[in-house]
Amino acid sequence: MARVGSLFAGIGGTCLGFEQAGARIVWANEMDKNACITYRHMHNGAPYLVEGDISKIDKTIIPKLDILIAGFPCQAFSIAGYRRGFNDDRGNVFFQILEVLDAQMEIYGELPRGIMLENVKNLRTHDNGNTYNVIKESLEAYGYNVDSQVLNSMEYGDVPQNRERIYIVAFLEEDKLTRFDWPERIEPTVGLNDIIDRNNHLDDRLYYNESSQYFNMLREAMISHETVYQLRRVYVRENRSNVCPTLTANMGTGGHNVPLVLDFENNIRKLTPEECLRLQGFPRTCTFPEKMANSHRYKQAGNSVTVPVIRRIAENILNVLDISDEVNLGEQIPQHTI
């Protein structure tokens, strides 16, 4: 069973995708305390989860890894960000990944056989491609063979969300990369109304009413029970492809950032945080802690990954690595918090 370590793990969407593919998470790190609460809630306590700033954690405590995965913070590379890339302190967190590789070589005498990274689509073109080239060349300097692909969740994850992300895979053995196949596009089977509850009245706090600032504008524009809408202060945008637009972390700031729906009784409301999780492909068994504030729930869902896309990539990684040795389940996994 492949041993996987996860950096910038969030609520564990990437970890879950690899677990579904048949891997075992032996170590994970996340610094957001509320995301850690949700991670533990979703992953049976997750004793392997290290809470804290990765730059301050002793990386020699990380157990030996077959695969390293990371969805490193994307603000420094996103179109919505400042576009400063590696000149932005947030962009420099990529180099924490390299420090983990150094520690693995120092302690165990070898590197993880495979790597998978996830980031915003704009990473590939940022700074005329220089940012991506630094990442690729940095991994190649460790001996990795690197490839990448931009995949849309609605085309490769069978979820009704328009979400394009770049995925980077790297293998120490060149023939493994040659044998690796990116997932093929699949026909969608899950629609918005398979996820969105338009039948029942939910939490009153989700609804717009006549006292709401934008109610009249929303009432005039929102007429379809098949799609979602976005409030853009001076107008309302309908998603005509009948999928949800990209969920974002700033949904946690509330207001017009959360997509809106019209239920079958013509009430206008925001998507629930749980519906956002489903739009990221989390199974219904994955829930938020009961006392978690909605602001944190929305942020965590928007910051996460589309689990089925990760699972499909992970399956193909595991197939080419062909790791069949079982992990000793009695082995002690280091636990550490700062």
Image (spheres, rainbow, N blue to C red):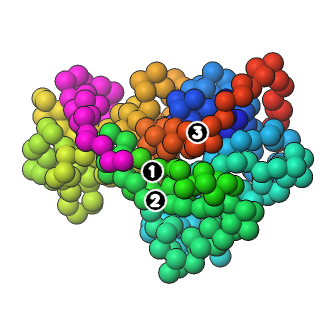
* C-alpha distance separating marks 1 and 2: 8 Å
- Callout 3 crowding tier (Cα within 10 Å): few <14, some 14–19, many ≥20: many
The residue shown at (52%, 29%) is 20
The residue mark sitting in front, 1 or 2, is 1
- Residue situated in front as seen by the camera: 214 or 254: 254
Q: Which residues are magenta?
A: 184-206
Which residue sits at x=52%, y=50%?
A: 180
Front disc: 3 or 2: 3
Q: Residue at x 36, y 38 (%)?
A: 279
Upstream in sequence: badge 1 or badge 2 = 2
| Mark before the other along the chain sequence, 3 or 1 | 1
Up the image or down, 308 lies above or below 112; here it is: above
How far apart in space, not on screen, are marks 3 and 2 (Cα)? 18 Å
SS of the residue under disc 1:
loop
What kind of residue is marked 3?
Answer: Leu
Which residue carries the number 3 mark? 318
Q: Residue furthest bottom?
A: 128
The reply to whether the magenta stretch includes residue 185 is yes
Mark linked to residue 182: 1
Q: Position of residue 187 (x, y in %)?
A: 25, 41
| Residue 235 x %, y % | 20, 61
Q: Residues within 10 Å of mark 1 (few under 14, many from 20)?
A: some
- Kindly report the distance in space between the C-alpha atoms of the residues bearing marks 3 and 1: 12 Å
Number of numbered discs on residues = 3
